[in-house]
Image (cartoon, grey):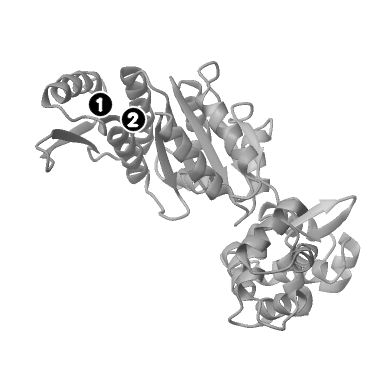
Amino acid sequence: PVDRRHEIARLVEGLSSPRRNVNFAVLGHRRIGKTTILWKARQELIERGFNVAYLDLSVYKYSPVEFAQGVMSQITQNYTKGLRKIEKAQAILSSLLRTLSKLRKLKFTLEPSVDEKGEFSIAIRPELVETEDYSKVLALAFDYANEISKKSRNRIIIIIDEFPTLLEFRHYPKLTNILERFRSVVENRQNVCYVLSGSRVHFMKEVVGSGDSPLFGHFVVLEVTQLEEKDAVELYLKASNATDAEAKSAYSIVGGHPYYLIMLAENRRPNETVEQTYGRILTSPTGALYLYVNYILKEDLGSSTKETRLLKILRAIASGNSTVSTISAETGLKITSLPFYLRELENYDLVKRSNGKYHVTDRAVRDYLAIRL
């Protein structure tokens, strides 16, 4: 990925260093390149021999049991991947099972197999016994990581993509204090490192960077931002048969957002300027950016009972009404009620406040709202 070598190297070197045992929080807005960075770092760490478990909560909405099962299954598969000779397999497996017998509420399925060369291997699949105590379920998964890291004498790295989704576990019995429980996991880890990732930048900064948060001080923050002009131009040129002038024009319109640059490059028609392409894919009901902006607004505001008022405030800010008083005048909402709604929009990363004025954070969202006033 263009201009992401620094972020990848920082993750890989930090997580693989024998002198450090550090956790990372990777922050960045949607489609900014976080998952690409995580996957590339994961690949390099695996190539260096580390045991890496990766769970993407944006793709699959795990229950606590499914999440714990996923952590343990990936760790086990990675640990036993290299077993071939039956003697070696039996020795390691018996030792592993003795270690795992310390852990409660686990049972194991052993799956022996023989490949086309006649080589023997065994896959261990840990399974959770049904329980209503979800706090113990999660604790078990992380204890399991500690035990395997000690037994294998190898660092285990657990990557949780879209970490804010995990916090929804607080709706389950005995998980209302999920952040405090996760802090205990981090504080009691062995040779295990955690990487948390999240697209809600404002929220993630509160979780790992606020002094009031249980996770404060436990994570090194790595924020993924937009590409610099040089790298943005390079990315645009890679995605299309374009001139430098066209690539620079694309950067002037959408900045260094990788997804927007690629959409501009892939959707540009012959004899169409970059500005015309941008307007078309942002306003046409089938346009790539039109669909994406509507997805953002629906995901962030669609579940809110205050959707109409929040959207009205967003439109006011996009049209240039940036102070509380001008927003109030534009929307007809009381000044006293606006701070509550504005904080909610900040939590969604849809607006930011600077020098007493509010701005729509995303260029495409801002332009879409301004065009549709």
Could you tell me how far apart the alpha carbons at marks 1 and 2 are, in whole angstroms? 8 Å
Residue at the spot 49% in from the left edge and 37% down from the top edge: 178
Q: Is residue 176 visible?
A: no
> What residue is drawn where x is 87% and y is 67%?
321
Residue at the extreme top: 19
58 relative to 224, above or below: below
Please tell me whether mark 2 sits on a helix, a strand or a loop: helix
Mark 2 Cα-neighbour bin, 10 Å: few <14, some 14–19, many ≥20: many
| Residue 9: image location, x then y, percent | 59, 34
Please name the residue that numbered disc 2 is placed on: 140
Q: Position of residue 268 (x, y in %)?
A: 66, 76
Q: What amino acid does circle 1 point to?
A: Arg
Residue 7's place in the image compared with 165, above or below, is above
Q: Earlier in the sequence, mark 1 or mark 2?
A: 1
The disc label shown at residue 104, or none? 1
- Indicate left or right for 236 with 330 as reference: left
Residue 45 appears anywhere in the view: yes
In the image, what residue type sits under mark 2? Leu
